Image (cartoon, rainbow, N blue to C red):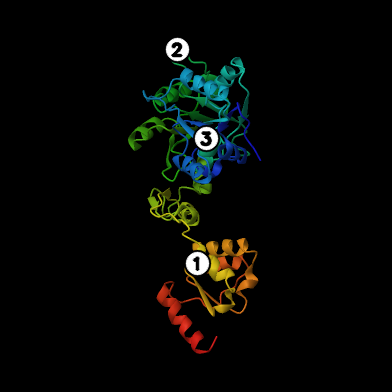
Amino acid sequence: MKTARSGTVYLAGAGPGDPGLLTVRASALLDDCDAIVHDALVAPELLSAVRARRAVPAEMHFAGKRGGDESSARQDEITALLVHLARAGKSVVRLKGGDPFVFGRGSEEAQALARANVPFEVVPGVTAGVAAPAYAGIPVTHRGVATGVTFVTGHEDPGKAASQTNWKALAQSGTTIVLYMGVRSLPRTVQALIAGGMSPDTPAAAIQWATYPIQRTVEATLDTLAGRVDAAGLTAPVLAIIGRVVSLRDEIRWFDVPERRPLLGRRILVTRATSQASTLSEQLRALGAAVIEMPATRVEPLDRAPLIAAITGGGLSRYRHIVFTSQNAVHVVWDTLRAAGLDARALAGIVVSAVGPATAGALLEHGIAVDVSPRRFVAEGVLEQVEPVLAAGR
């Protein structure tokens, strides 16, 4: 079923970094669209997964958009590209970090598309202002501690004569303050809040690369926050949280805990074929690793004529024993059986061996329980187990 409509731009949020936080709607559009225009903060792992899933690749357009990077595309260039692609009849996903309408300039792009009479839809994403504190073990609201939260940017339009933020009112609001994009202006922001009446001892934290395996969190007070961030060498992307809720981190911290996730900060290369990498990759990510899938092998079926002949030319009853050496072998044999109009019953009366529990599991998914499974998951192990079976006359 076609998910994305031709000539339409989808302003979609990619979430804060962890590919698992991508919404179902955004994922479906990425799998079906003609072109993807993505920001610098979209996780490379997310884009790699999209490429691996798609039978027909999408056009990929890098739109930069990283603060302070002179190589970033200008906003008018990005908008012109979106209009051009849509008018060419393509379905376009404009993929932005976090949520497109939370400090993402998505509304500006929506305005430009509306003026150009280009159809568009908005697909909300998980914003970093909620996800980053959550991954650091900091709730933005908590009963009896904070009943409100304020999102504010520390990087306002440089063309404005004065700040639009009423720091004095914010300092006295009693809400949790979540500060986006404010590393450079952090000292000035801290001074404004203290001058506005906020206690210098207010708990505060800064989170770099939130939701990524390389996430770092610095805890401080409002008065010491800028110094701690500078001393730790934190650079963008960083999000700051100011408020009493930060004190809850000691109790409910869960993500960046080395005892639970011993591979935090480690980057691991998985060289398995794409079709086999996902399980291992997920296990490594669960332990905190940053996983890069770079297949060193590719599984390609060769000439199936001998297999087809073995299955159809007199049937499999001519064989006493079949050995499956991998999950790939299971898939190839099963697909060939089904193409011949056969199923698991074709293996009745034949001794079935599998090298390793994963291969045995793949067989069981098709209703085939193995008769022989070696203690050593190599070909020699199969021979060791098969010998007594053959000697018994099976």
Q: Element type at marker 1?
A: helix
Looking at this view, is 379 or 286 the one in front?
379
Q: Residue at 55% across / 42% down in the picture?
A: 21
Residues packed near mark 3 inside 10 Å, few (<14), some (14 to 19) or many (20 plus): many
Q: Is residue 19 above or below residue 328?
A: above
Question: In this figure, which residue is indicated by the disc labeled 1?
Answer: 306
Residue 346 shows in the view: yes
Task: State which quadrant residue 170 falls in.
Answer: top right
Q: Position of residue 380 (x, y in %)?
A: 40, 76
Indicate the position of residue 39 as horizontal and vertical percent values.
Answer: 47, 30
Relative to 159, residue 359 above or below: below
Q: Amino acid at mark 3?
A: Ala
Callout 1 environment at 10 Å: few (<14), some (14 to 19), or many (20+)?
few
Q: Which residue is mark 3?
A: 128
Q: Secondary structure at mark 3?
A: helix
- Looking at the rendered structure, the kind of residue marked 1 is Pro
Q: Residue furthest bottom?
A: 392
